[in-house]
Amino acid sequence: MSGTVEDEVEFPILCETCLGENPYVRMSKEARGKECKICNRAFTIFRWLPGRGMRYKKTEICTTCAKLKNVCQTCILDLEHGLPVQVRDSALSIQDSVPKDEANRRDYLEQMAGGLNTVGQQPDFSGRAQPAGREMLKRMARKEPYYKRNRAHICSFFVKGICNRGNECPYRHEMPDGDPELAKQNIVDRYHGNNDPVARRMMARSAATTKSGGLAQPPEDKSITSLFVLGMDVSVTQDDLRAFFAPYGEIKSIVVPAKGNCAFVNFKHRKAAEEAAVAALDGCVVKGRSLRVAWGKPKPKGPQSELRQNGSAGDKASSGLLGDSSAYPSQDPTAMGAVRK
């Protein structure tokens, strides 16, 4: 096998779907049993049966490559949301930093292997800095594991009408009814987030939902006049955003947080915000940078705001009763007129 050898590990990095619903799953382990399909290094391979009626599954990439992208070693999907890398990186504005040519990739992995075990050195795929992108991923992600993905593959001989194994055939005897493009999946493309047919289909479905009444539909709360811009970087300034959105109406303010690749564009009138939303919600390009836009959220209304209002009212009442010189009521029982017996 070409390349270096990965350190031996005790357990693979798997998502809940690939692990299966059987809590007593048994695995076979073979040290340096195969080459990683991304870095071509020999790694410890695991093999197991996720449940009855399912097919045997095995790890396809090494743990180092899985940690670099925060993906499952078997299905190469994101561990947190269960979505393709292309969908996650597009929503969170993450650039693929892993070199695609073999020589540079080997050097890159050797440099990153030590940093992956150091706290604070791991790449951040949580989306905390991209709240709008994270919300989009939550809407697209499944709520529960999809164990049907572990079923046996369709028997190609049955499709041709020449399978004679009957019930003893370990493959499914049914005709394929899905999109033929989904059969052209490639592990390397899925890992790097390029030309993934599953990701393209999911993003197209999300875009269709958005146009039919998702983000493009103005919120019912007429007080919302702000747009949330996602995908910012240091090259895009407030003046650039103002120049792009100013033709749609008067802008009240533009807020760019110090940390986070986002911005808030607050319009003075609701009509101007709606016109800007129609033009930009499908995506816009500012100073060569592709940005995504969503409607802002209303100000929170709940117990916290009520407490703040009650607190301000209480402060006024206490200041009128006790005067400005006393910040808190006295704890002396005789101070408010109580008489000792």
Image: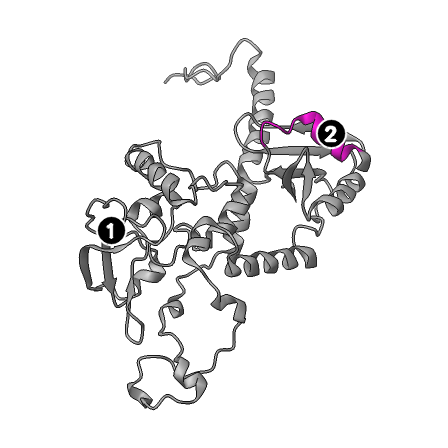
Which amino acid lies under the numbered mark 1 shown in the image of this protein? Phe
Q: Residue at x 72, y 38 (%)?
A: 225
Front residue of 150/159: it is: 159
Q: Say few, some or many: other residues with alpha carbon within 10 Å of mark 1 (under 14 / 14 to 19 / 20 or more).
A: many
Mark toward the start of the polypeptide (2 vs 1): 1
Q: Residue at x 55, y 14 (%)?
A: 322
Q: Would residue 283 be found to the left or right of residue 27 on screen? A: right
Q: Is residue 135 above or below residue 33?
A: above
- Count all numbered tags in the image, as a single digit: 2
Q: Residue at x 66, y 50 (%)?
A: 215
Secondary structure beneath disc 2? helix
- The magenta span reads 233-246
Q: Which mark is drawn over residue 43?
A: 1
Q: Is residue 299 above or below residue 214?
A: above
Q: Is residue 30 above or below residue 99?
A: below
The residue labelled by disc 2 is 242
Where residue 193 sits: x, y (%)? Answer: 48, 50
Which amino acid lies under the numbered mark 2 shown in the image of this protein? Arg
Taking the magenta stretch, the answer to whether it contains residue 178 is no
Secondary structure beneath disc 1? strand
Taking the magenta stretch, the answer to whether it contains residue 243 is yes
Front residue of 269/104: it is: 104
Q: Residue at x 42, y 44 (%)?
A: 101
Where residue 96 sits: x, y (%)? Answer: 47, 42
Where residue 269 sits: x, y (%)? Answer: 79, 36
